[in-house]
Image (cartoon, rainbow, N blue to C red):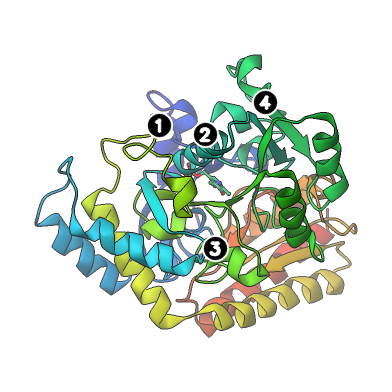
Amino acid sequence: MNFKKSNKLYKKGLKHLVGAVNSPVRAFSSVGGNPLFIKKAKGTKITDVDGNEYVDLVLSYGPMILGHRHKKVQKAVEKALKNGYSFGASTENEIKLAKIVCDAFPEMDKVRFVNSGTEAVLSGIRLARAFTGKDKIIKFSGCYHGHQDALLVAAGSGLATLSLPGSKGVPEGAVKNTLIAEYNNLESVKKHFAEHDDIAGVIIEPIGGNMGVVIPQDNFLKELKDYLETKGALLIADEVMTGFRSKFGGAQELLGVTADITCLGKVIGGGFPVGAYGARNEIMENVAPLGGMYQAGTLSGNPIAMAGGISTLTELKKQNPYEKFEEIGAIIEVILLETAKKYNVDLTVNRFGSMLNPFFTKTKVTNFEEAQTSDTEKFAIFFWEMIKNGVFLPPSQFEAWFLSSALKDKDIKVIADAVEAGMLAVSKM
Ligand code: PMP
């Protein structure tokens, strides 16, 4: 396997693109090496410009839940393209996708489509403030909610990968209303309420996916929701990653908790740029044109993206792959754990349905601090062995691996063989 063409494109890309990437999570800096350049993908496989083929566990960081270029999605999008790309006016498909989304979340009467997860969350936060008339928001360390100023503190994803506490260029004033709590620790939330009486709500990834996978323990989410109700504060579920992935109704359906405001992205666009935020009527009626909270978008509800979203969600509902995800996820988890044991490698695997990842640590991982006990040098060695053996992973210890419903036994065999090579290499360090 060689990466000649990728390396050449990387050098060329450096001239006019920052680090030759358009999102820092695509840089390979934390695993040492240059980013791969992708040519195409189909089903479970992704192919780079050098012709190397991988079983794809990145899946565009989650959206490609049916695998790449599912024929029904491809057909729907091609059909939409024939009618035009963007109108700056409403289309029937926006209503169709809105119904599919609202039907999946029992507390969601209305939804507003935007173009990314970042936009969904920044609008959801603005809405929580508009509805409650309060300013402060609690977030959990290690959770990532997109790159809006107010939430770029103690954030996961690329910031965790690059060991950045926050972002330069974010003025103090922009984060002065952001309070940080510890995931899985309700007391750390209560402490803030004891000190502040102007907290609008708490934003959470109901299943953490941006510090690696971190699972809410016991009844954490339910207790959080119950507590917030006593305080008149809102629960804002950032289901950008988990929406339609954990279950059709997201992590909320899986965990039996309903949020006041839900933010969505990734899967709802099936690979096209779509985000959304939604809530019950009394909350959504604050959004312009019904109310005074302003939020807009030239390309929002884009017809091509709507077609991608409708066809993806319709097919997903039909396939109902959640049991299959559970089975395959469990198989991969066992492969990781047993192979690590065979080679005497300390490993913790966190998994919830179709999101999982290994941490190279003995410690259980229930929050960001524990996630950071993972040996990232071991991860880097493991990562390259996986690549060389045909499995494409996120180039970071702190990103989730994703499963698609297209996965077949032969893909799992490729994964198992790659894990064997990866753990052997780690054991020799
Ligand atoms: N929230 C969560 C939970 C996410 O995982 C992400 C992206 N990884 C975002 C928000 C931001 O979404 P986007 O990258 O589409 O802006």
Q: Which secondary structure, mark 2?
A: helix
Residue 141 vertical placement versus 398 (above, below): above
Q: Earlier in the sequence, mark 4 or mark 1?
A: 4
Q: Are marks 3 and 2 in contact (CB under 8 Å)?
A: no
Q: Quadrant of residue 246?
A: bottom right
Q: Are marks 2 and 1 in contact (CB under 8 Å)?
A: yes
Which residue type carries mark 4? Asn
Q: Quadrant of residue 74?
A: bottom left
The reply to whether residue 341 is visible in this rendering is yes
Q: Secondary structure at mark 1?
A: loop
C-alpha gap between disc 3 and disc 4? 36 Å
Looking at the rendered structure, the kind of residue marked 3 is Leu
On the rendered structure, is 26 left or right of 344? left
User: Residue 57 has which mark?
Assistant: 3
Measured Cα–Cα span from mark 2 to mark 1: 8 Å
Give amino acid for label 2.
Ala
Q: Which of the numbered marks, if any, corresponds to residue 373?
A: none
**Which residue is denoted by mark 1 in the rendering?**
292
Closest to the observer: 275 or 95?
Answer: 95
- Mark 2 surroundings: few (<14), some (14-19) or many (≥20) residues within 10 A: some
Query: Compared with residue 403, is residue 135 higher up or lower down, i.e. above or below?
Result: above
Which residue occupies 40% across, 39% down? 287
| 2 or 1: tag closer to the N-terminus | 2
Res. 389 in view: no
Question: Badge 4 local density, few (<14 within 10 Å), some, or many (20+)?
Answer: some
Q: Pointer 2: what residue?
A: 130
* Between discs 2 and 4, the one toward the N terminus: 2
Q: Determine the CA span between mark 4 and mark 1.
A: 21 Å
